[in-house]
């Protein structure tokens, strides 16, 4: 029951695509992650995924049903609807706050082959 300094949490790790769980609201995890390079095409069949860019810029590739890209800059939010294949990426690196139901796997329910630099996890507790 203490305030959480998001900058301190971000300063505590360098791993990309390896979200840290900083808090929980009801049954939802509040996660911080560093994005750099490309993630993997994946889908969450039963939940939306909330992205808030804290620093940097990200792109989210979407297949809904046509393929398109949404670009988010610092301070912008976007929600990927459940059942939508998506692929986050960041050319220059970014810090992102994510909101997902607790236990949601970082590579979704269905995904392409996962590259070595992507951590397959439900998040790491801070």
Image (tube, rainbow, N blue to C red):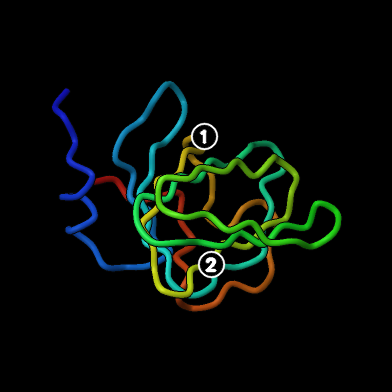
**Which residue is pictured at 47% across the width and 38% down the height?**
99
Residue depicted at x 70% and y 40%? 82
Crowd rating for badge 1 (residues with CA inside 10 Å; few <14, some 14–19, many 20+)? some
Answer with the quarter of the image where residue 45 lies: top right
- Element under label 1? strand
The disc placed on residue 18 is: none
Which one is in front, 17 or 58? 58
Direction from residue 4 to residue 20 in the image, left or right? right
Say which residue label 1 marks.
101
Q: Residues within 10 Å of mark 2 (few under 14, many from 20)?
A: many
Instruction: Check disc 2 and report its element: helix, strand or loop.
Output: strand
The Cα atoms of the two marked residues, 2 and 1, are separated by 21 Å
Residue shown at 40% from the left, 52% from the top: 74
Quarter of the figure with residue 6: top left
For marks 2 and 1, give the one nearer the viewer.
Answer: 2
The circle drawn on residue 89 is: 2
Q: Earlier in the sequence, mark 2 or mark 1?
A: 2
The percent coordinates of residue 26 (x first, y second) are 43, 21
- Image vertical order of residue 12 relative to residue 15, above or below: above
Note whether 2 is above or below 45 in the view shown: above
């Amino acid at each position: 029951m203490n305030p959480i300094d998001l900058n301190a949490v971000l300063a505590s790790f360098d791993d990309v695509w390896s979200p840290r769980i900083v808090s929980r609201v009801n049954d939802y995890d509040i996660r911080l992650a560093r994005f750099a390079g490309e993630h993997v095409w994946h889908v969450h069949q039963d939940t939306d995924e909330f992205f808030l860019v804290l620093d940097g810029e990200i792109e989210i590739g979407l297949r809904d049903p046509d393929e398109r890209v949404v670009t988010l800059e610092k301070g912008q939010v976007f929600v990927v609807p459940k059942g939508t294949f998506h692929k986050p990426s960041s050319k220059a690196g970014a810090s992102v706050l994510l909101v997902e139901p607790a236990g949601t796997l970082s590579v979704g329910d269905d995904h392409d082959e996962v590259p070595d630099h992507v951590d397959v996890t439900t998040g790491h507790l801070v």
